[in-house]
Image (cartoon, helix red, strand yellow):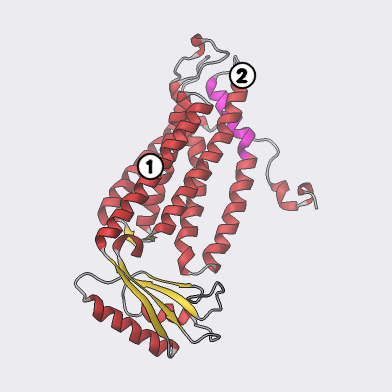
């Protein structure tokens, strides 16, 4: 069945003529306020650190070979102890490459001031009462120092990703395009952190992966808009820059909407069917896709409008244009 035959596609206009630049100043102020609030929220009340960044204990729980270990009951039994973040993952038995459902890796936090040995014993008792006779092995405790180093490494990975994206855009386009893209990326990352704090989502390595994915998606959408903008700058040499930006965004809008909605549909199914482990990951990604689309329109493009661009290789055309004012380049 062709896309034209799908009734829902007809709801999208073939061509739009929306004036995005007209409202750029208002949305810019709103974005600045939200970014400041998100940064402040990261310090107070702060991120809800998961096991990866706060430290905790891990152990393998196994039933006899061939007997299934109920992961939901295992997670629920440990969750009732009030130990914070609890992670349960099915794994293959020691010495086997096949996951037969009889073995799981259990990870949980150890509250400050509590004796580690006592907490581990309470967990073992709760698990045995919930799922029957099991064996425990590979018990290990990760200290806060190691977790702190892991947290710093995660932040360094995010920073390095932003710098590499900036270098890519600078190489492919012009410096003002690079600055517009990086400001948009920082905007997306900061607001995603704000969402994590607002809804008290567990900040773990999964969440770092989600933010890195948001950076990649946002950059992809920004490159599509910037590429069309560069083409139109060469094609319409006498058109005011604000009109060229509006034209470029409108020409890529349907593609952006279809791509974003498709990704959000998949992530929504993952959020509701993937269990607690993938819920925060999926929510952060859905929010990041929405914000990434928004930033391509109202963060990255307005930076180019304020900076100005060169046309046809002439330096006389590189005149900064004030945001919200029509001007001939």
Q: In which quarter of the image is residue 253?
A: top right
Crowding near the residue tagged with mark 1, few <14, some 14–19, many ≥20 C-alpha atoms within 10 Å:
few
Total tally of numbered discs in the picture: 2
Please provide percent x and percent y for residue 83.
31, 74
Q: Say what secondary structure mark 1 lies in.
A: helix
Q: x and y percent of residue 71 in the render?
A: 48, 78
Residue under circle 2? 234
Task: Tell me the CA gap for discs 2 and 1.
Answer: 33 Å
Q: In the rendered structure, which disc, 2 or 1, sits on the residue that comes first in sequence?
A: 1
Q: Residue furthest left?
A: 113
Q: In this view, does 145 lie to the left or right of 175?
A: left
Picture quarter containing residue 19? top right
Q: Farthest residue in the front direction? A: 95
Q: Is residue 245 magenta?
A: yes
Q: What element carries label 2?
A: helix
Q: Is residue 288 left or right of residue 118?
A: right
Question: Mark 2: few, some, or many residues within 10 Å (few <14, many ≥20)?
Answer: few
Q: Which of 148 and 307 is in front in this view?
A: 148
Q: In this rendering, does residue 299 appear at all?
A: no
Residue 238 appears left or right of 28: right
Image location of residue 196, percent across then percent down:
38, 56
Which residue corresponds to mark 1? 159
Vertical comparison of 7 with 323: above or below: below
Q: Residue 15 carries which label?
A: none
Bounds of the magenta segment: 241-253
Residue at 22%, 69% in the rendered image: 112
């Amino acid at each position: 069945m062709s896309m034209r035959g799908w009734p829902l596609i007809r709801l999208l206009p073939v061509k739009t003529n929306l004036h995005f630049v007209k409202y750029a100043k208002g949305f810019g102020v709103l974005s600045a306020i939200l970014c400041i609030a998100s940064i402040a929220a990261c310090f107070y009340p702060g991120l809800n650190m998961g096991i990866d960044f706060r430290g905790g204990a891990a152990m393998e729980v196994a039933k006899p070979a061939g007997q299934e270990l109920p992961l939901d009951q295992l997670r629920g039994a440990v969750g009732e102890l009030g130990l914070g973040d609890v992670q349960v993952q099915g794994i293959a038995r020691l010495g086997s490459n096949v996951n037969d459902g009889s073995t799981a890796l259990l990870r949980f936090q150890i509250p400050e001031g509590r004796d580690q040995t006592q907490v581990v014993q309470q967990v073992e008792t709760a698990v045995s009462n919930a799922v029957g006779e099991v064996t425990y092995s590979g018990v290990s405790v990760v200290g806060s120092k190691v977790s702190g180093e892991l947290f710093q490494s995660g932040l360094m990975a995010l920073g390095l990703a932003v710098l590499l994206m900036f270098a890519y855009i600078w190489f492919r386009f012009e410096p003002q395009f690079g600055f517009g893209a990086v400001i948009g990326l920082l905007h997306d990352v900061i607001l995603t952190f704000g969402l994590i704090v607002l809804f008290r989502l567990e900040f773990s390595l999964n969440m770092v992966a989600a933010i890195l994915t948001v950076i990649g998606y946002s950059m992809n959408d920004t490159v599509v808009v910037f590429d069309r903008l560069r083409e139109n700058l060469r094609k319409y040499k006498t058109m005011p820059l604000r009109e060229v930006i509006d034209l470029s965004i409108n020409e890529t809008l349907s593609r952006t909407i279809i791509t974003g909605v498709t990704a959000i549909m998949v992530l929504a199914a993952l959020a509701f069917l993937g269990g607690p482990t993938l819920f925060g990951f999926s929510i952060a990604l859905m929010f990041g896709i929405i914000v990434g689309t928004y930033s391509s329109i109202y963060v990255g493009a307005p930076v180019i409008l304020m900076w100005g661009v060169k046309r046809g290789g002439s330096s006389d055309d590189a005149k900064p244009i004030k945001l919200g004012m029509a001007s001939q380049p």
